[in-house]
Image (cartoon, rainbow, N blue to C red):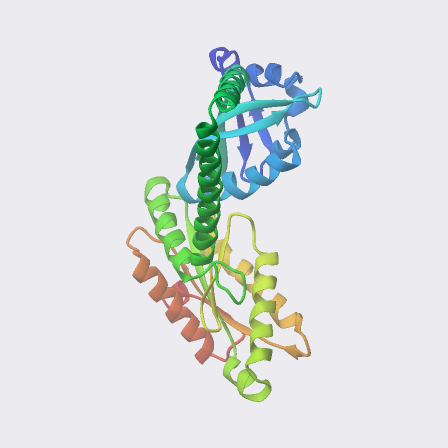
């Protein structure tokens, strides 16, 4: 590592797409009171508390995969003495030698936090003194507290509404709106980085006969069971969503025409081999891999046509759009 980077006035680390630390500078090792070799090869989340792991897992990974960077994430890293070190983190997603890395810098925030605590403590003391001498201020404080509660409730409700707006209520998967936003982001990322990805459209074979024979409640159980299977078989970087009816879509990064069909075949064979209650189902899959000429509409159109070919050629099969060429 370059000597200037090694002793930079901020911590630096680079992790693989799965979160394994590939490199770290001496500043970060000193900040956490580790030898650098003790950190290399370990998962970044092993240096976090449970709370920070959850935040890192649910915010950092999805955001950097979707947008290619994160800015000013506030969290804590755990030092060798098990004490938390508060830091501000910036990160960027990059590809080197065909492998995806997430390069991050961290700045220790301990002094700022102590200063903020002092300010909050002083503010609280002033409020207590003022409240003791002025009854009217007590009423104002109560109103202020009520306002803060209502504001937090509103934030919570807005968060719930945002989650609901992007979630399919039956299966719990992401919905069509989230899929379309993710597809646009992946296409933009492809044009910036040339990082290829593929789109799967998956359709349950003869699903209408399941509803007609066993009723819609059983059909709903099949849909939720398949959603759970797709989620379990996918990677963290994949996008899995319900497209509508019995159709599901997957955005699978880091795939090409040469390597994507075995992945789709794994999904197809897993579906065929997995009972859905007392039923067994099959699914047909259409695939399209991004090209420089593709738009959102053309990519979906190619995957949809490949799905149609799977259906017309006997169902329970995988077809890539390029197979027709």
Q: Whole-percent x and y of residue 188?
A: 33, 46
Q: Whole-percent x and y of residue 306?
A: 41, 69
Residue at the (39%, 59%) spot, across then down: 177
Q: Whole-percent x and y of residue 314?
A: 50, 80
Residue at the (63%, 26%) spot, across then down: 40
Q: Which residue extends farthest bottom?
A: 213
From the viewer's side, name the closer residue of 144 and 210: 144
Q: Whole-percent x and y of residue 30?
A: 61, 14
The answer to whether residue 96 of the structure is visible from this angle is no
Tell me which corner region of the image, top left, top right, bottom left or bottom right, holds residue 79: top right
Relative side of 271 to 164, left or right: right
Up the image or down, 48 lies above or below 291; here it is above
Residue at the (69%, 21%) spot, across then down: 80
Residue at the (43%, 50%) spot, across then down: 158
Up the image or down, 59 lies above or below 225; here it is above
Tally of numbered tags? 0
Relative side of 18 to 158, left or right: right
The answer to whether residue 29 of the structure is visible from this angle is yes
From the viewer's side, name the closer residue of 111 and 324: 111
Which image quadrant: the C terminus?
A: bottom left
């Amino acid at each position: 590592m370059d000597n200037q980077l090694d002793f930079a006035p901020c911590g630096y680390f680079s992790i693989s797409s799965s979160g394994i630390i590939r490199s770290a500078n001496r500043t970060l090792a000193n900040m956490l009171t580790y030898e650098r070799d003790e950190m290399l090869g370990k998962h970044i989340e092993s240096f976090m508390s449970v709370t920070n792991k959850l935040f890192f897992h649910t915010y950092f990974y999805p955001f950097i995969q979707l947008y290619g960077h994160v800015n000013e994430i506030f969290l804590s890293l755990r030092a060798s003495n098990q004490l938390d070190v508060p830091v501000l983190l910036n990160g960027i997603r990059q590809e080197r030698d065909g492998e995806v890395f997430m390069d991050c810098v961290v700045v220790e925030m301990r002094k700022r936090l102590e200063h903020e605590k002092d300010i909050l403590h002083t503010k609280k003391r002033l409020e207590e003194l003022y409240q003791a001498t002025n009854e009217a201020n007590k009423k104002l404080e109560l109103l202020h507290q009520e306002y803060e509660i209502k504001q937090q409730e509103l934030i919570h409700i807005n968060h719930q509404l945002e989650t609901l707006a992007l979630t399919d209520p039956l299966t719990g998967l992401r919905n069509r709106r989230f899929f379309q936003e993710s597809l646009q982001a992946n296409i933009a990322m492809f044009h910036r980085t040339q990082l290829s990805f593929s789109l799967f459209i998956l359709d349950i074979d003869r699903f209408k006969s399941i509803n007609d024979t066993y009723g819609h409640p059983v059909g709903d159980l099949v849909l939720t069971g398949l959603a759970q299977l797709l989620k379990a078989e996918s990677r963290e970087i994949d996008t899995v969503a319900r497209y509508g009816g019995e159709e599901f879509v997957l955005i699978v990064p880091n795939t090409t025409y040469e390597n994507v069909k075995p992945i789709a075949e794994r999904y197809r064979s897993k579906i065929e081999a997995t009972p859905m209650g007392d039923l067994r189902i099959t699914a047909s899959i259409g695939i399209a891999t991004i090209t420089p000429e593709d738009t959102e509409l053309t990519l979906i159109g190619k995957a949809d046509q490949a799905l149609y070919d799977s259906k017309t050629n006997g169902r329970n099969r995988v077809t890539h759009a390029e197979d027709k060429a």
